[in-house]
């Protein structure tokens, strides 16, 4: 059931990315490349100089657009996650020991974490594909939108919003440390930051027992408890 839910979240995120492509400027680049490719092909047909160059350039742009979309989508699923340091995309890892998070009185699992060394309170949301922070939190912890990243579409209590994607150097809570993790900077989130499935799915496992969420990373160590 967890795998099915994770796949559903990934498909939802993929759909959101695709919907945001026009806003990222990639749609315009794609249309220009297609037009250039057509013009280049006609130039080649009538043996006009530079036709092959224009056609090859349009193909290069189209491949670049496709690679950009595929790379971002691949980061949502740990089974096909890609680490490309040359492009500023680090490996996403979640390591440490078993950590227990008690259920809060409001019915949610909350934890106190450090993001890039700054304290941030998170709610764990197993229905969220991506970890998300508010714009205010992003400013405070020094988190900036990724250059060349495609915005993602999020469904929140205040409606559907467009959010920029970023990379978090480190999120640390209990005995868990997540590094290189993708997150979104979401406006209108208020003070709520969210731990999503892109972190949870990189654990060895997670479960809820007696109103306690138990997170088990790889290489488990003695359990620690964290909370509000």
Image (spheres, rainbow, N blue to C red):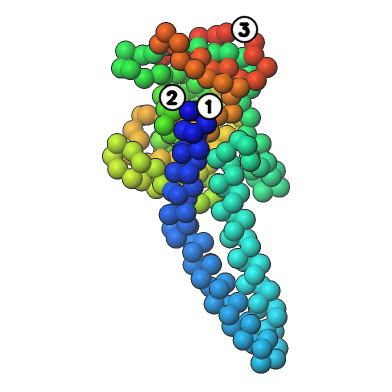
State the separation of the CA atoms marked 3 and 1: 19 Å
Q: Residue at x 45, y 18 (%)?
A: 111
Neighbor class of circle 3 (other Cα within 10 Å; few <14, some 14-19, many 20+) is few
Q: Position of residue 76 (x, y in %)?
A: 55, 40
Q: Position of residue 112 (x, y in %)?
A: 46, 18
Is residue 204 toward the left or the right of residue 14 in the image? right
Q: Residue at x 44, y 28 (%)?
A: 126
Is residue 90 toward the left or the right of residue 205 in the image? right
Residue 177 position by quadrant: top right
Mark carried by residue 124: 2
> Relative to residue 76, is residue 105 depicted above or below?
above
- For the C terminus, the quadrant is top left
Q: Residue at x 62, y 66 (%)?
A: 61
Circle 2 SS class: strand
Q: Position of residue 179 (x, y in %)?
A: 61, 30
Residue 131 in view (yes/no)? no
Q: Which residue is mark 1?
A: 200
Looking at the image, do the residues carrying marks 2 and 1 touch, with CB atoms under 8 Å apart? Answer: yes
Is residue 105 toward the left or the right of residue 18 in the image? left
> Relative to residue 51, is residue 211 depicted above or below?
above
State the separation of the CA atoms marked 2 and 1: 9 Å
Q: Residue furthest left?
A: 158
Mark carried by residue 222: 3
The mark nearer the N terminus, 2 or 1, is 2
Neighbor class of circle 1 (other Cα within 10 Å; few <14, some 14-19, many 20+) is many
- Nearer to the camera, 85 or 72: 72
- Nearer to the camera, 1 or 88: 1
The mark nearer the N terminus, 3 or 2, is 2
Looking at the image, do the residues carrying marks 3 and 1 touch, with CB atoms under 8 Å apart? Answer: no
Q: Position of residue 142 (x, y in %)?
A: 52, 36
């Amino acid at each position: 059931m967890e795998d099915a839910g994770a796949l559903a979240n990934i498909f939802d995120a993929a759909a959101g990315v695709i919907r945001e492509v026009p806003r990222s400027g990639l749609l315009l680049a794609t249309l220009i490349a297609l037009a250039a490719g057509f013009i280049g092909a006609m130039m080649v047909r009538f043996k006009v100089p530079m036709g092959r160059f224009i056609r090859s350039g349009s193909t290069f742009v189209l491949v670049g657009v496709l690679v950009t979309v595929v790379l971002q989508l691949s980061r949502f699923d740990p089974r096909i996650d890609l680490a490309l340091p040359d492009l500023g995309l680090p490996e996403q890892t979640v390591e440490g020991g078993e950590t227990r998070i008690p259920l809060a009185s409001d019915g949610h699992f909350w934890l106190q974490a450090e993001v890039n060394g700054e304290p941030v309170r998170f709610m764990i949301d197993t229905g969220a594909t991506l970890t998300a922070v508010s714009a205010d939190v992003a400013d405070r912890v020094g988190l900036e939108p990724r250059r060349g990243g495609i915005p993602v579409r999020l469904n929140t209590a205040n409606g559907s919003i467009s959010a920029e994607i970023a990379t978090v150097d480190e999120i640390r809570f209990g005995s868990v440390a997540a590094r290189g993790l993708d997150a979104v900077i979401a406006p209108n989130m208020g003070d709520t930051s969210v731990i999503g499935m892109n972190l949870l799915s990189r654990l060895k496992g997670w479960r809820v027992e007696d109103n306690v969420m138990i997170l088990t990373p790889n290489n488990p160590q003695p359990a620690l408890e964290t909370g509000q």
